[in-house]
Amino acid sequence: MDNLEPHDDLWIAVIDTERRYSVWPQDKRIPLGWEPAGFA
């Protein structure tokens, strides 16, 4: 894989009911039990 290739992936920070954070693709639906938490 060539790390020099540009990509336009956008991600958001999400948090679950147990206060665990993760990142999620912005163009995908956030799974049940998770909600937006800010920007990544």
Image (tube, rainbow, N blue to C red):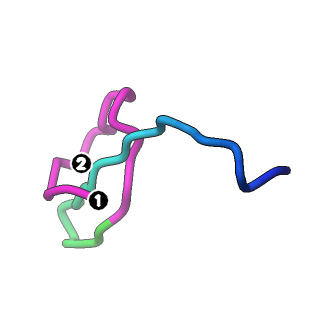
Name above or below for residue 9 compared with residue 22. above
Spatial CA span between label 2 and label 1 = 19 Å
Q: Locate residue 15, reporting x and y percent.
A: 22, 61
Residue name at image x 20 percent, y 56 percent: 39
Q: Which mark is residue 29?
A: none
Circle 2 is placed at which residue position? 33
Please rate how many residues cluster around mark 1, counting C-alpha atoms within 10 Å: few if below 14, some from 14 to 19, many from 20.
few
Q: Is residue 38 magenta?
A: yes
Residue name at image x 33 percent, y 38 percent: 31
Circle 1 is placed at which residue position? 40
Q: In terms of sequence position, does the residue under pointer 2 or pointer 1 come before the other?
A: 2
Left or right of 25 on screen, residue 33? left
Residue name at image x 56 percent, y 38 percent: 7
Q: Locate residue 26, reporting x and y percent.
A: 33, 36
> What kind of residue is marked 1?
Ala
> What kind of residue is marked 2?
Gly
The residue closer to the viewer here, 24 or 16, is 24
Q: Tell me the magenta residue range.
A: 22-40
Query: Within the image, what quadrant is residue 17 found in?
Result: bottom left
